[in-house]
Amino acid sequence: MFASCTSRNAPGGTSKRDVEIDRRIDGLLSAMDGAGKVEFASLEALSLINRAIFQAPRPSYTSRAHPWSPAQFAYVRSGAGYDFPCVWIASKRARAQKVVIHMHANACDVGHIYELCARDAECWRANVLLVEYPGYGASSGVAYERSVDRHVAAAYVYVTEECGVDPKDIVLLGRSLGTGPATKLASAIETVDGKTLSAVVLHSPFTSVREAGLALLGDIAHVMSDRWDNRAHVVKYKTRTLIVHALEDEVVPFEHATILHEMRQTAKLPSVLHSTHGTHNYFSYYRDYLQPINSFLDASAKVGIAPRMLPPLPDPIPRTRFSSAQVKSIMSMIAEQTPAPDAQEQSLGMRFYGMVDAMGETLPSADSTSPKKSGFTRFGGVSEFEQRDNDDKRSISPTSTIEGDNESSASGDSCDDEIMIHTPGGAKPRLIS
């Protein structure tokens, strides 16, 4: 599919088609943020609130040095006189119809998430477009609400106009900060084009930036001018929506996901809420991310047919490296969450971990004679195996985390220079010297 896309390998160029693309981008942007707004990037750059919200890390790539092939690197027309970089990841397992437009979290760029998103493309059998925000990675400019909205609107126009993808085959996926522009774009597409997308996936969404700030900063967040009010936009589109959120999320409380889900249910709009274990940045990549989204996308394409289980992930699966601070944090969390053997505590543990684990096996009860799973196994991985053609057995539920020191991992969306990697289920953490 990518071969049919018109990819700018370098910025620049104006034609009648470019003018039409600019008009479409402006139309979507007007529906997202209001018509006639004048942008002053220099003033937005001085905003202390913008500086606090948009925490771009040191770029993990440049236009000349990056981990993907030149064919995957595309400059997308912004509609504001400049082009910005995106990365196209084509599914290698099959010719894919679906395209996932991925809007990443804060404090990382597309270079940090490229490796995992390449695995997403294989497992979901979908092509993935990674959208870069202004001021992140190799993208120039200043990040503020309207400039980020412009980039995601331009990415959608790129996929539909230059790649020729039908909107019914497009999935919008936003994680944390990226859920704000995702809901706004979904509502704008139905308002302007009158078309429904394949699906919207919101991973760790917030009701609004201000309300998320209240959970972190307390009453001081009341002085903030609000940004990305998901309450207002999540009920303005009909596209079926999956909300994935961790019960113990310490950055964006789980209640935010519950509120958004209930608002859509009240409005009689299709919505699925999938609660997971772990925290904002610590979760099982396979059980809490890949599999729920895969099941949701399969169900949307094949109504009435049970979604397929994911095949084993490609070898080799790298082992997670933890800092000593992360190991202490994880082990402390496991100790607090491990249920006591009495019946009352066991029921609480069953409720927290779910009545079944990632592969559908019922957790042992208090009086069960089956061996009890270790805390680390239940926290991140599972012990199930899948029989392969050569009768070899291997774990198919790796644990995902983010490498970095404990302080950076506990303060919002964080990605270090090392990409998120994962480990086979039950593997013990390896300290970084």
Image (cartoon, rainbow, N blue to C red):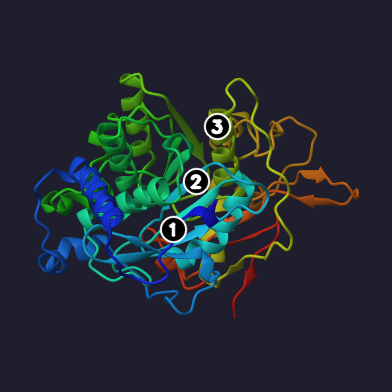
* Whether label 2 touches label 3, CB < 8 Å: no
Q: Mark 3 against mark 1, which lies toward the viewer?
A: 1
In which image quadrant can residue 139 be found? bottom left
Look at the image and tell me whether residue 245 can be seen: no
Please tell me which residue is depicted at 71% across the width and 56% down the height of the picture. 314
In which image quadrant can residue 318 be found? bottom right
Q: Mark 2 against mark 1, which lies toward the viewer?
A: 1
- Helix, strand, or loop for circle 3? helix
Mark identifier at residue 327: none
Q: Earlier in the sequence, mark 3 or mark 1?
A: 1
- Helix, strand, or loop for circle 2? strand
- The residue at which mark 3 appears reads as 351
- The residue at which mark 1 appears reads as 6
Q: Residue furthest front?
A: 16
Position of 253 relative to 302 (above/below): below
* Structural crowding at the residue carrying mark 1, measured as other residues with C-alpha within 10 Å and reported as few (<14), some (14–19) or many (≥20): some
- The residue at which mark 2 appears reads as 99
Q: Quadrant of the C terminus?
A: bottom right
